[in-house]
Amino acid sequence: MKMFKKVLSLALAGAMVLSLAACGGKDSGSSDGGDAAETFKIGSIGPATGAYAIYGLGVKNGAQIAVDEINEAGGINGYKVEFKFEDDEVDNEKSVNAYNTLKDWGMQILAGTVTSGCCTAVGAETANDNMFQITPSGSSTDSIDGRDNVFQVCFTDPNQGIASAQYIGEHGLASKVAAIYDSSDVYSSGIYAKFKEEAKNQPFEIVAEGSFTGDNKTDFSVPLQQAKDAGAELVFLPIYYQEAALILAQADSMGYDPTFFGCDGMDGILGVENFDTSLAEGLMLLTPFAADAEDEMTQKFVETYKKNNNDETPNQFAADAYDAIYAIKAAIEEADVKPSDSVSDICDAMKAAMVKINVKGLTSDEGGMTWSETGEVSKAPKAVVIQDGKYVSAQ
């Protein structure tokens, strides 16, 4: 009996050695595209909690849909994709900590961060590490300036300002325009600076402008009264939706009912707690994504997003994140990199590939989107208007 046990133990030990050897073969860095043990690890960072969670959760959920689709279709060049999202609460230091956490996980590519300030802070780290970074929504030029490893899916702040002025002028939305912006915020002030500059070329006049700071953003009665007294038919709000909700409520209380026009930071206003969404009726915003678009790609994405997220309609942050993942896929395929390549080698190859690819995504028209060596995206802007409590494409 003892001899039988000894023989059995030796046999089991041999089997374990063979099994471990087989597993070790798959983890050894094989370049075989069918090697299931190798995956591309894509990380993402943004607010999953706090006041701006609607942005971060949109990015997380939109990116996950793209990852799931890619894996179901066989991966990227036969390699599967792993995705991991970390919360930064829109705090630069926490965002850098999240980046380090993802590096410990094995991240090779960063699809983030969500907000501009954090994107700029983390961009310094990815530049030092030579890790490829593409941000869905970090729109500040500071996020890409001097960093050839960082690319944007969203429009830059200056481009949003220029495109907004052109849209208002070309569609004859108003002859007298007022503006209210946050002078302490690079996103808001950056957009408005270019809007004001481009307005000189458009058939409307800026008749009033008011600013506020992050320390004083609850009472907007003075700039609203100035806009009303100046006869502004449209008020441009290159600000975030929380402050915009207060402005709309205060304008209503003083009997002022102009057209309000915002940019991508306005997306989310319909989800503000205790906000009367009827006050947003007719509000317009420049955005690269309209959830009611009738093309097959958008309809499929919206259907899947609602199914996965309690019937919630996806915002542009979700759509930009979805497109960011597919841009990563296209660049990997163009560069022909593998998960076994170093982070730096992957980055160098993908940087070169980004200026060659064209991605037709949720946030582009049939012309697709392309990228310059500076990291800026080129794609057609769109506008949506809130009607009956929903975002619909502006005509």
Image (cartoon, grey):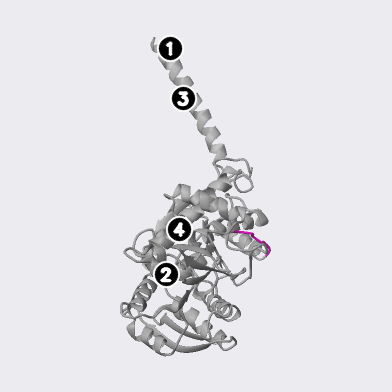
Q: Point out the image quarter for the N terminus.
A: top left
2 or 4: mark nearer the eye? 2
Residue at the (63%, 70%) spot, across then down: 372
Q: CA separation, marks 3 and 2?
A: 70 Å
**Element class at badge 2:** helix
Q: CA separation, marks 1 and 4?
A: 61 Å
Which badge, 3 or 2, comes first in the chain's sequence?
3
**Element class at badge 1:** helix
Magenta stretch, main secondary structure, is loop
Which badge, 2 or 1, comes first in the chain's sequence?
1
Range drawn in magenta = 356-361
Residue bearing the label numbered 2:
280
Which badge, 3 or 4, comes first in the chain's sequence?
3
Which dot marks residue 13? 3
Residue 150's quadrant in the figure?
A: bottom right
Which badge, 1 or 4, comes first in the chain's sequence?
1
Q: Is residue 81 visible?
A: no
Crowding at dot 4, Cα within 10 Å, few <14 / some 14-19 / many 20+, comes out as many
The picture places residue 109, in percent across and down from the top left corner, at: 53, 57
Could you tell me the amino acid type at mark 3?
Ala
Crowding at dot 1, Cα within 10 Å, few <14 / some 14-19 / many 20+, comes out as few
Viewer-proximal residue, 28 or 335? 335
Could you tell me the amino acid type at mark 4?
Gly
Q: Is residue 292 visible?
A: yes
Viewer-proximal residue, 274 or 229? 229
Is residue 340 rendered to the left or right of residue 387? right
Q: CB of mark 3 within 8 Å of CB of mark 4?
A: no
